Amino acid sequence: MINDKNDKMDRREALKISGMGIAALLLPSLRQDEKTPENMPRGEAGMNVVRIGNLYSTQEWFYDPAGLYIQKGEKVLWVARKWGASVTAFHPSNDNHELRIPENAKPFDSGVVPLLDTDYEGMDRFEYTFEVEGTYDYYSRYHEVLGMVGRIVVGQPGGPAEKYPPGYGNRDGRAVVYPQQIKLFETLLGSEEIVAKKVIRYPRGILGRPVVVGPHG
């Protein structure tokens, strides 16, 4: 004779255990945005790698390193941990932005860079080779208001990004450069410091705001 009471307890235990297993599988993805940049994938040996990351807890999207020094002819690889960001040069051909790369350099725009390990092979990263010396400022099309910008100095500082402050193009009808972007350029991304340090990591929290959870969220 089957003991209904024990049978029900066994079912409850089985559901509990299976539920814990599912939660364990989901937990890494739920906490993915909290991983440190050091844990993010690296590129080819010797390649300059910039990681595209975000922290939902502080509403931050960022490039890490935010500042990078390279030599002419070197390649930079951007890799994405979250879907939705872009790597887009400050250039009038990119949504009417002000010119903040060398005048004779070709503007770049990655489009949306999907999450790593996507099924779409080759679309989880963006590569660009810098053939012209000077200072290159770039941004994410969809996270500008959050201050998502980066700077790369190639060989030596130079070009419009060194001649004019962020936002100079506003008087000529160019796209807005948001206050958070200007803050990052002015407080972290000085070109001389980039040249001296070679790599400037993005300091988490510099632009972030804690997410306020209300009674219904």
Image (cartoon, rainbow, N blue to C red):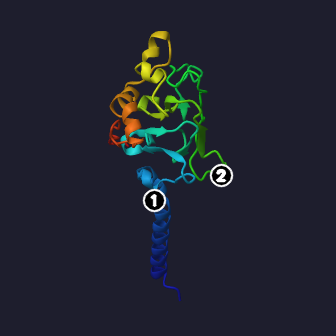
In the rendered image, is residue 31 in sight?
Answer: no
Nearer the observer, 191 or 215: 191
Q: How many marks?
A: 2
Which quadrant: the C terminus? top left
Mark 2 or 1, closer to the camera: 2
Disc 1 secondary structure class: helix
The span from disc 2 to disc 1 (Cα, nearest Å) is 21 Å
The residue at 57%/52% (across/down) is 44
Q: Where is residue 24 drawn, in percent x and y?
A: 46, 64
Q: Where is residue 136 drawn, in percent x and y?
A: 50, 30
Labels 2 and 1 touching (C-beta < 8 A): no
Horizontal relation, residue 138 to residue 118: left or right: left
Task: Identify residue type, mark 1.
Answer: Leu
Callout 2 crowding tier (Cα within 10 Å): few <14, some 14–19, many ≥20 = few
Residue 24, compared with residue 61, is above or below; it is below
Q: Where is residue 114 drawn, in percent x and y?
A: 58, 44
The residue at 45%/67% (across/down) is 20
Disc 2 secondary structure class: loop
Callout 1 crowding tier (Cα within 10 Å): few <14, some 14–19, many ≥20 = few
The residue at 50%/63% (across/down) is 25
Residue extending farthest to the bottom is 1
Horizontal relation, residue 44 to residue 55: left or right: right
Residue 40 bears which disc, if any? none
Task: Identify residue type, mark 2.
Answer: Asp
Residue 27 bears which disc, if any? 1
Horizontal relation, residue 161 to residue 79: left or right: left
In the rendered image, is residue 191 in sight?
Answer: yes
Of callouts 2 and 1, the N-terminal one: 1
Q: Where is residue 31 drawn, in percent x and y?
A: 43, 54
Residue placed under numbered mark 2 in the picture: 119
